[in-house]
Image: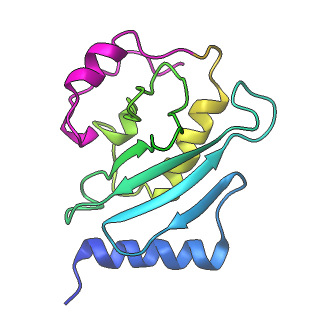
Amino acid sequence: MASISSRRLAKELREIQAEGCPVGISLVEANDFSKWVFTIQVMGDSLYQDEVHTLQFRFDPQYPISSPAVQFVVTDGKQAPIHPHVYSNGHICASILGNEWSPVLSVIAVCVTLQSMLASCKKKERPADNDRYVKHAPENPKKTLFHYDDDTV
């Protein structure tokens, strides 16, 4: 018997394959039901114009009840976008990945939200506590208890 998590992810993957991804979002890898990789690009005029960033989703057996672990991939000279809610190690401080996660959200909904977060950014800068956080950050961003005090950036 398949788990709720694998059934849900299979359904989301079928929808992506049938309908495609929204403009600026591409599925790169979905080999199993533990890790998926996407690229996202902000379309139109923004501070991130012409930049393509890679997002990694890791799923635990409680998905979609629990949120996926989502982070920007930082490897081979690729850096995370410079944004007030994105740490240089790729961890993202976004309430929908934490206390505002809902099982009705999908992987694509998260991608679109993060694409929108980048599109609406007014100033490229790292979070104020970037160096301290990155030095002590857990490998899994879900193990961080972020404080969501600014959802307007």
Q: Is residue 146 magenta?
A: yes
Give left or right: position of 134 versus 39. Answer: left
Q: Residue furthest front?
A: 76
Which quadrant: the N terminus? bottom left
Image location of residue 147, percent across then percent down? 28, 20
Give left or right: position of 69 versus 53. Answer: left
Which quadrant: the C terminus? top right
Q: Is residue 152 magenta?
A: yes
User: Viewer-proximal residue, 106 or 49?
Assistant: 49
Residue drawn 38% across the image and 72% down it: 9
Image location of residue 144, percent across then percent down? 21, 32
Q: Which segment is the magenta one? A: 125-153
- Give the quarter of the image for residue 117: top right
**Residue 11 drawn above or below residue 131:** below
Image location of residue 38, percent across then percent down? 53, 56
Residue drawn 59% across the image and 52% down it: 39
User: Viewer-proximal residue, 126 or 150?
Assistant: 126
Residue drawn 24% across the image and 21% down it: 135
User: Viewer-proximal residue, 49 or 7?
Assistant: 49
